Amino acid sequence: MGSSDQLKSESLLELMKEHLTTDAGKQITKKIGLVYQINIAPKKIGFDEVIFTVDLKKGEVKKGPYEGGKPDATFSFKDDDFVKVALGKMNPQVAFMRGAMKIKGSLSAATKFTPDIFPKPAKM
């Protein structure tokens, strides 16, 4: 796997990192106040996963597992499915029922992780 195989999710999470530094982003942090770990697999959940931490207590997004204890909820996605859910093209409940998203940890925390917390992509 070369570095050209960058996950689509990674650029989305980069946008989110920038979004959390804005006023709108700070509102999200204030409102949610939870920590999520997101495991993104290129092709199949559970294989070659890249781990990201979305810390909505501190308003940070970083690559790597959460280091401050246990995240409130952990999601596992295939790269394409994460992008669909984040962009609002796939309903998170539908993704979960189809097995496109796996959740560990608090389900009430998981339900607060909605497409609304992602910045809206710039219209092309």
Image: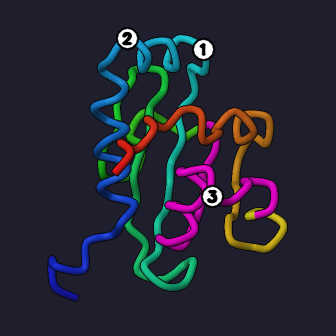
Quarter of the image where the N terminus is located: bottom left
**Few, some or many C-alpha atoms within 10 Å of disc 1 (few <14, some 14-19, many ≥20)?**
few
Pointer 1 or 2: first along the chain: 2
Three-letter code for the amino acid on which mark 2 is drawn: Asp
* Residue that sits furthest to the left in the current view: 3
Find out whether residue 88 is within the magenta segment. Answer: yes
Quadrant for residue 115, please give it.
top right
Give me the C-alpha separation between circle 3 and circle 1: 24 Å
Give 123 or 90, whichever is nearer the viewer.
123
Three-letter code for the amino acid on which mark 1 is drawn: Lys
Q: Nearer the viewer, mark 3 or mark 1?
A: 3
Residue 69 drawn at (x, y percent): 49, 36
Residue at 34%, 29% (x, y): give it.
19
Residue at 59%, 33% (x, y): give it.
116
Residue 71 drawn at (x, y percent): 55, 40
What residue range appears in magenta? 72-94
Q: Mark 3 points at which residue?
A: 89
> Does 76 sit left or right of 108 as displayed?
left
Q: What secondary structure is marked by label 3?
A: loop
Q: What secondary structure is marked by label 2?
A: helix
Pointer 3 or 2: first along the chain: 2
* Residue that sits furthest to the front in the current view: 124
Q: Mark 1 points at which residue?
A: 31
Find out whether residue 114 is within the magenta segment. Answer: no
Q: Is residue 16 above or below residue 21?
A: below
Three-letter code for the amino acid on which mark 3 is drawn: Lys
> Does 82 sit left or right of 99 as displayed?
left
Q: Mark 2 points at which residue?
A: 23
Pointer 3 or 1: first along the chain: 1
